[in-house]
Amino acid sequence: MKNIFALSTVVLKESVRRKDFYVLFVVTAVITLMMGSVNFFHDSQIDRYLKEICLLLIWISSLVITITMAARQIPAEKESRTIYPLLAKPISRTEVLLGKFLGCWLATAITLIVFYAFFGLMAMSKEHHWPVANYFQAIWLHWTMLGVIIAMTVLGSLVFSAVSANVTISFMAVTFILLVGRHLDQVAVRLGEPAHSLLMGLFYAIPHLEFFDVRDLVIHNWPSIHWSVCVKATAYGAVYGAFFLLAACLCFRRRALN
Amino acid sequence: MKVTEESPQIAACRAAPVLLVEGLRVEYPNRELRQEVKVAVKDLTFQVRQGEVFGFLGPNGAGKTTTMNVLLGFTRATRGDAYLFGTNVREPIARQRIGYLPELTYYYKFLNAEELLRLYATIFKIPRKKVEHLVDAALKLVDLEHARKRLIKTYSKGMQQRVGLAQALVNDPDLLILDEPTSGLDPLGRMKVREIIQRLKNEGKTVFFSSHELGEVETVCDRVVILHEGELREGGSVKELVEKYNCNLEQVFLRVIGYHP
Amino acid sequence: MTSIDVNAAQWKKRPLVAVLCLPLLLVCAFCLATNLSLWFQSWPGNRAESANAMTVAMGDARRLFADAFFVKADAYFHSGMYPSIYDNRQSFQTPHIAEDSGAMKGKNTGDEANFLGPPRNWIDAFGRQFYPSVHTHLSEGGANGKEEEGTVGEILPWLKLSTELDPKRVEVYTVTAYWLRRMDKINESEQELREGLKENPGNPQLLFDLGRLFSEARHNPVAARNVWQAGLRNLASLPDKDTDQNKFITEQILAALAHQAETERHPNDAIGWLERLEKVSTTPQAVQHWINVLKGQKTP
């Protein structure tokens, strides 16, 4: 466990010292503030569109940061040959992979805290109230989803040889799941065999990331989700995360580095 | 040709050698000819004893790096086994008492030397109280104390090589594995590496290293093995080989690999 | 001079040549630009002529986005609880914000509250626990039941964006104006309609809504009547006056004029408008009944 934490701190330091996060945060903040300065019919109480745009930017930024960070971990170690002195130490490949995963996941937690803090301040300045439970659920489920995506992308980094290919495929997969994952069964109904069975199989096999997209909870001030549902969603994310990580470990364990 | 004792004797002293390679064979799929496999190492057997400086020699493509990759767990052997301090190299714990300096040293460029050494020390499970002391000692040994807080990406090539040496020594290893330790170094750097190897030898540590610098090998090594086309062709103490062939080590090497000018 | 010296001299001259090339290249680029700009100004596909940044950026594709934002406003009206393109949209064929405002003739059928139907599988059932599955309107308390009347203004940014993207889409102006009126923003409502008329001169639907604003909010029946009558004239001159939507507007204008005349105690005028209404109305019996009532009032 100590090795996993030690490696995760390296990933954290790397993410803090790279410029991606800062650039995306500044872009998000500037666009949000620009949109916030627009006057719609002299009504200062209108704020949901602003919350929606800000959250959309936060989601895009978090996905960009997460996927690019997770995709480069192992290939970059191989390419820069830093993996050789590392694996020459008493550390297993499973520990390396878990350390990378944990580091990425913690880095995304910091990213989300910073982004949502900005979002919260912006929303509070307009609404003058802060539904803590809603915010917590939105951040928690968002973070859980990013955990699944990190595990999926790390697995992808061991399957696809090029980082760019992995980033592109991971982005496409995540976007596809978020946009149409929920409706695949409805699309399948309209198709004949074998497309129907294939699509239904895909519907049940993919991790339904859309469960974790509860932005509307914060935007429209919906009543909080029942906590038991949150726990179930977390367990669902954990199962998929564990599945992808296990597959990645099996892939990485026997693979020759050269 | 085998340079060490026969198999029953190897079994008897399995616990004693620092490094034991037994019937090692490594095959790679040949991508150009799909039906065939490429044999990188053919049934290699040798051992390295406590306190000796052991030279691992061979021309390019002889199988030295592949053997080292097996010893460090980067590659799995097709057949045969290798042991470090009596533990199979497949177990990560086998690498607890070793230090490794790769031929090309690249380290996390976004870390500084101190952070890098602290990370590796943590992986060696060195108690936190001792970590700072060991990091200081390693940095002092390679003359990098003044640059300990600077990011590695700002280091010159020589400084990066020295960080590599520092990370290989941070756990005070009993066995140091060096892959072409002096390649790319200026004369001063080479001298420094030689001094460190000599110092480690005096401290009773074991050093296993591959090199093309045969003059250097002759100076510091107790024993050597010479690999060619994946097979062990010759081995023994430097003195024995020089006497046997009646020439210097470089000429011994050329004759063993079948080069006749 | 050795060959090495010659090479050295050439190397020394090269930076000077490069420096001289830079202004030459700039002059060439300027000449080409002046030549090309003449052609580009007259080219029909020149987006840069538009003052609208959206048009420059998106071209005609902006109309698709305008439609999406109009639907987005309706989704906001339902606190985000809205059917996707894969769901049953029978009860959402006409956006409810438009139907409520009277800007569009409603085509909605079916159960608004149950467009999702029963859960199709466990994934669908589990997914529904993440959002409220109750049909609510922002103007009636919203998803949490506590929304104030003014919260309905949350739909306005999307409507504004929709009109920015497609200024020719009339119903968006009328919907925006209607909800602004409901929020007591009379000046903003009138401004929105006038902007619509600027983009769509003489549009009957916009004139009808402007008349409503004059009548109900400004209490200026004369201005209202003038605007409505102008709307009727424009409708009659339209080549597509017999479309459902135009018939719907005609009905609304005639009914409004009749109602106005009735309020001003001019039953003859009212009956005149109603007789015209009876000819185009989808419910002539109801109009006839109204006429009879007015005639009954007149008799004593």
Image (cartoon, rainbow, N blue to C red):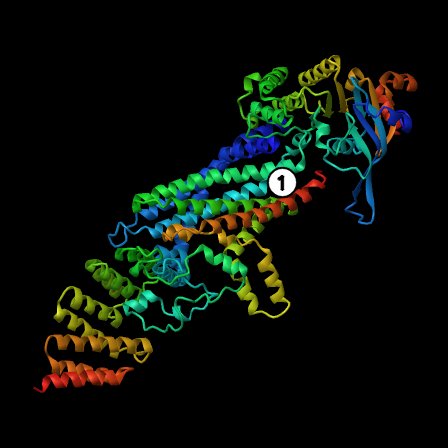
Q: Is residue A74 above or below residue C43?
A: above
Q: Which is more toward the observer, C209 or A182?
A: A182
Residue A94 in picture, x, y percent from top left: 65, 38
Residue plotted at (61% across, 38% down): A98
Horizontal relation, residue A168 to residue C111: left or right = right
Q: Which is more toward the observer, B36 or A2?
A: A2
Q: Residue furthest left?
A: C300
| Quadrant including the N terminus of chain C | top right
Q: Quadrant of residue B90?
A: top right
Residue occupied by mark 1 = A75
Q: Is residue A174 above or below residue C45?
A: above
Q: Is residue C247 above or below residue B163?
A: below
Q: Quadrant of residue C295?
A: bottom left
Residue C141 in picture, x, y percent from top left: 30, 58
Q: Which is more toward the observer, B90 or B192?
A: B90
Horizontal relation, residue C223 to residue A255: left or right = left
| Quadrant including the C terminus of chain C | bottom left
Residue C108 in picture, x, y percent from top left: 37, 72
Residue C234 in picture, x, y percent from top left: 24, 75
Residue A231 showing in the rendered view: yes
Circle 1 marks a residue in which chain? A
What amino acid type is highlighted by mark number 1? Pro
Query: Disc 1 on helix, strand or loop?
Result: helix
Q: Residue furthest bottom?
A: C299
Q: Residue furthest front?
A: A228
Residue B234 showing in the rendered view: no
Residue plotted at (80% across, 21% down): B54
Q: Is residue A253 above or below residue B133?
A: below
Q: Which is more toward the observer, A73 or B6?
A: B6
